[in-house]
Amino acid sequence: MVDELWSFLKNKNSQLWVFIGFEVDSRFWMNFELGSRTTHTATKRVMRINHYLSKLSRINPVKVTTDKLAAYKNALQSVFTEIDYVYLQIVKKRIKMRLVTVKKGVGA
């Protein structure tokens, strides 16, 4: 799974995004990447995941889950050129901080 969260430095106008990659079953955090919420940062994150995967004997296809941030789709398509993967997007909708819907879809 790949996801991001934000925090701030000194004030809320100085946003800091933390992109994380972790293995869901074991809750193992492979690593994290600090940066802006862009394709550049997402690609750096996916490249590091790709580096870890290249060292493991893995079961194909690799399962990747993200939210609907387009940067993930772009990063996966550019980095996972030699890896068989299945991509699932989970989109949550909130109204006034209350979760109202969760939609799952195959990222194409």
Image (tube, grey):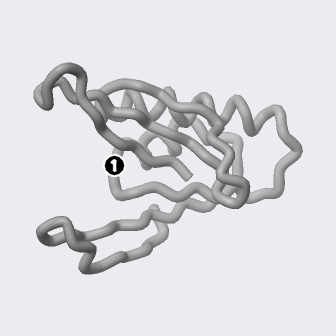
Location of residue 17 by image quarter:
top left
Q: Residue sitting at 66 percent across and 35 percent down?
A: 50
Q: Residue sitting at 19 percent across and 20 percent down?
A: 10
Location of residue 97 by image quarter:
bottom left
Location of residue 42 by image quarter:
top left
Query: In the image as oriented, which residue stretches furthest toward the front?
Result: 10
Above or below, 58 against 35 in this view is below
Q: Position of residue 73 (x, y in %)?
A: 43, 49
Above or below, 49 against 34 in this view is below
Above or below, 99 against 39 in this view is below
Query: In the image as oriented, which residue stretches furthest toward the top?
Result: 10
Q: Residue sitting at 14 percent across and 25 percent down?
A: 11
Q: Say whether residue 64 is left or right of residue 58.
A: left
Q: Say whether residue 38 is left or right of residue 97.
A: right
The C terminus - image quarter: bottom left
Res 64 seen here:
yes
Classify mark 1: helix, strand or loop.
helix
Disc 1 packing (10 Å; few <14; some 14–19; many ≥20): few
Q: Say whether residue 19 is left or right of residue 1.
A: left
Query: In the image as oriented, which residue stretches furthest toward the right?
Result: 57
Query: In the image as oriented, which residue stretches furthest toward the bottom?
Result: 100
Q: Position of residue 28 (x, y in %)?
A: 68, 45
Q: Say whether residue 33 is left or right of residue 10.
A: right
Identify residue type, mark 1. Ala
Q: Which residue is mark 1?
A: 70
Res 108 seen here:
no
Q: Position of residue 103 (x, y in %)?
A: 37, 76
Q: Position of residue 81 (x, y in %)?
A: 63, 40
